Amino acid sequence: MNFSYKNIDTAHSEIKDQIIQTPLISNDYINKKLNAKIFFKLENLQNTGSFKFRGASYKISKLSDENKKNGVVAYSSGNHAQAVAYASLQQNINCKIIMPKNAPKIKIENTKKYKAKVVGYAEDKNRIPGIDICLKDQEIWNKNNFVAKIFHIPGHTLGHICFYFFKEKILFTGDTLFSLGCGRLFEGSYEQMLSSLNILKNFPLETKVYCGHEYTLQNSKFCIKYDSNNKQLKEKIIAIKKKLSDGLPTIPSTIKEELECNIFLRSEDKFVQRNLNSDNSIETFSKLRDLKDNF
């Protein structure tokens, strides 16, 4: 699907009564510094404080009546959480927001203000004031038509969890596994993150992976630098660029694709190890994560 100004105009016409018309301003200092006319859209004045309310409002408005009845689930530490919660509240839709341990307190409070339920890891209850629903590792979460198995996958944060909707074979990986990448280590260790990734490697190959951010193209540049002989990766990069040129998302991927192409799941591969002057999986993974932090 190719996007055009007409698509944007159509979306705006459907949500214009729900959003704030924020101002567009320019700044003489910046203009002179860059020798250009630069404009700033003050979306900090928008409902929930960011532009993300626009997309959330439009997407939720286009849900079928059946999907609206089932409710909405989102994973976010802040702006997206608030946007989805407020848009759901406006349209009287049940909403659950999964938030990580390092989510700012003010954003947790604001999300709850919009009547969303905050879901978190049970052992983080004392670290994250405001968790409404506490989930444990290996627990089956059955709530309002959502049935998922919970997996504790520390590394990015100590209390990070993922949701496996086993009936649909859909995996919400948050900030642990990205398409062709993995999350930074804010609280956990290399060993913890690698162990968590190894858990995710064992899901059915056809499982669809929905991650917390879409960094696919940039991640692919890193992967190919250290895994240049990977034929499947080269083919995936072509497919990624085609999707983006057609205005399509690169998410979801699948466990099969990640196993074949994501270098962070290939730390046992001998070619990758040789490129990193390493002879074991944890050393290879540690070097990859450090290199990616500065890529």
Image: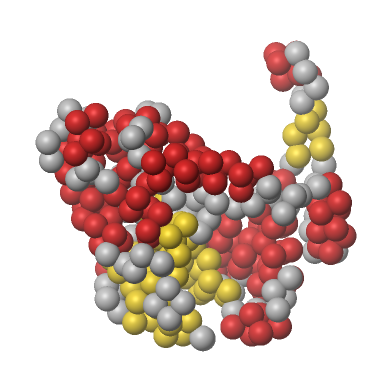
* Image coords of residue 8 (percent x, y): 81, 52
Look at the image and tell me whether residue 269 can be seen: yes
Residue 26 in which image quadrant: top right
**241 to 144, vertically: above or below:** above
| Colour convention of the picture | secondary structure
* Image coords of residue 224 (percent x, y): 39, 34
* Image coords of residue 15 (percent x, y): 81, 62
**85 to 94, vertically: above or below:** above
Q: Residue at x 27, y 64 (%)?
A: 202
* Image coords of residue 11 (percent x, y): 81, 59
User: Which residue sits furthest front?
Assistant: 231
Look at the image and tell me whether residue 126 can be seen: no
- 189 vs 40, left or right, is left
Q: Residue at x 47, y 46 (%)?
A: 236
Q: Residue at x 82, y 37 (%)?
A: 24
The N terminus lies in which quarter of the figure?
bottom right
- 17 vs 136, left or right, is right
**166 to 190, vertically: above or below:** below
Q: Residue at x 27, y 76 (%)?
A: 138
- Number of marks in the image? 0
The C terminus lies in which quarter of the figure?
top left
Pick the front one: 246 or 14: 246
Pick the front one: 129 or 171: 171
Pick the front one: 40 or 213: 213
